Image: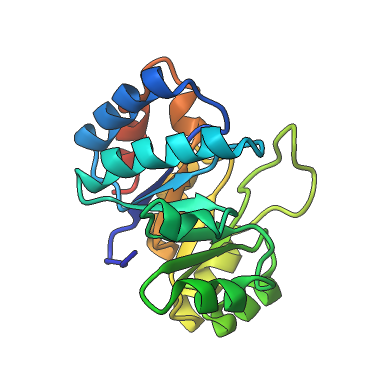
Amino acid sequence: MTSTDRPQIYLLTPPVFELESFIPRLGAVLDAVEVACLRLALAGRDEDAIARAADACRMAAHERDVAIVIAEHLKLVERHGLDGVHLMDAARSVRLARKELGADAIVGAWCGASKHAGMAAGEAGADYVCFGPMAETPLHNGAIAERALFSWWSEVIEVPVVAEGALTAALVAELAPVTDFFAFGDEVWSAPDPVAALKALAAAMG
């Protein structure tokens, strides 16, 4: 993942999907809007299902020169030709992931709304840190990642930063000057028209 002056799009898969119908939808979205990275973010522990999804999503992504990472499943990265891993425990697994995958792999870290966790992840070798959510959701009642956190980070820290969770077009416009990537998942896939939804969010980036 690389950063430019304009934020880039980091697309998440839904946590559950039917593979045969999802891959064409994914392809249509990737063809319509420029995406820097795709995260396979499947829920559950069905190794066979995750493996099949990893192979299919990798093909869809790499055919379009889009990097693909997988949430959590470090051991599946090299096995399925993925570009890296997204870790949910802030800095705790970053050094291990870097050791296992090597210097060229993408290693990202979810850090909630914690500046300290983000700094620790960056120091441990993360390629990016992810802060969020931007608003309360039914499944989250903890700290919210405020614009001030992104503003401080973009001024002080060189590690790219990702905004993720409960994003709206208004929040995208507000955060665009102070973040490197926007991670969109449910914002896209829960919409009747995922392509139109992502285009609208991309337009709000400026």
User: Can the viewer see residue 169 in this picture?
Assistant: no
Q: Give the colouring mode of the picture.
A: rainbow
Residue 4 or residue 69, whichever sits in front: 69
The image quarter containing residue 72 is bottom right
In the rendered structure, the answer to whether residue 113 lies left or right of residue 79 reads right
Residue 36 or residue 80, whichever sits in front: 80
In this picture, is 181 found above or below 12? below
Q: Position of residue 112 (x, y in %)?
A: 67, 58
Q: Quadrant of the N terminus?
A: bottom left
The image quarter containing residue 79 is bottom left
Q: Residue at x 31, y 67 (%)?
A: 2
Q: Residue at x 65, y 70 (%)?
A: 93
Q: Position of residue 113 (x, y in %)?
A: 68, 61
User: Can the viewer see residue 10 in this picture?
Assistant: yes
Q: Position of residue 31 (x, y in %)?
A: 20, 34
Q: Position of residue 148 (x, y in %)?
A: 59, 65
